[in-house]
Amino acid sequence: MSITPVSVSITDNDNGGLSIAPLAFQLAEGLTNSYTIRLLSTPTVAPITLLVEFPTDQVNVNGNIAPFTLTFSDTTPQTIPFTVLANSDNNSPRTITIQHTISSSGAAEYPTGTQAVVTLSIDELPPPPASPTCDSENFSADGVVRTGVPDGLANAINCRVLYHNGGATTWLGSPLYSTAHLGVPGLLDLGVLQAVDIFSPPPSNLTYFQNGIVLCLRGEGTLIWLAASHAPRTAEIIGSYTVPEFPGFTCASLFEPGTLVLVSVDPLTR
């Protein structure tokens, strides 16, 4: 039998939306984790742009230290890593959020302003042990720091080792310091050998080291300096030299607090 063709009109009724898993985390400062985010349906008009916002003093998200955007054209999930920053000024339990908002869309099922949130519950973490004076590092046989500090400054300048022979220092079984603490994303790509934070705790609170100090890190490579007075910190190549008293160390003259990093790859030759 011959049947007359039948016309059928199909209306797209796929619901738009954002899916995140997991939606909540319980963790402590310095720890890293990740979540996935995806669209619930392929958008009728692509791409869809999401603005990701978070408290920049509390967490580093997807390698970013400032709000950024994600782009989606289909339902393929994207994995977003994050690191809770070690915050010595706030050791109390607290809750923060990573907020995702559709900021650009041509698809009716994905209206701008649509949001999804990840919640991070951060537990109290005991502060790390007090850092020794830089001058006392000279007496550590396996230490990675050597210094020449004038007698008048010996008790006013402390050194906190961030990276020791290529590995981040740990506290309570987890890395205490991460890329974020070195101040500049991508710095670890240069092969961090050693890194030390130089600071002047109370009551001295020095912001300038009169006549300078000599600070040396174990190994050979390029020294990167991140002055504490810069916000956000910027990475600069600092002049280096060797001294007979500290064979096998690369040294620099410093005049203010900051972070000194020894890397194996010269950024000028990349």
Image (cartoon, rainbow, N blue to C red):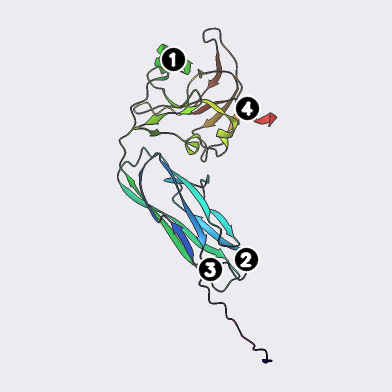
- State the separation of the CA atoms marked 1 and 3: 57 Å
Q: Secondary structure at mark 3?
A: loop
Q: Secondary structure at mark 4?
A: loop
User: Could you classify mark 3 by the number of other residues whose Cα lies within 10 Å: few (under 14), some (14-19), or many (20 or more)?
Assistant: some
- The earlier-in-sequence mark between 4 and 1 is 1
Task: Using the rendered view, name the quadrant where residue 49 is placed.
Answer: bottom right
- State the separation of the CA atoms marked 4 and 1: 23 Å
Q: Which residues are magenta?
A: 6-10
- The earlier-in-sequence mark between 1 and 3 is 3
Q: Which residue is mark 3?
A: 112
Q: Can residue 67 be spotted in the picture?
A: no
Q: Which residue is mark 4?
A: 265
Amino acid type of disc 2? Ala
At horizontal 52% and vertical 49% (from top left) the residue drawn is 66
Outermost residue toward the top? 244
Q: Secondary structure at mark 2?
A: loop
Q: Secondary structure at mark 1?
A: loop
Q: Which residue is mark 2?
A: 46
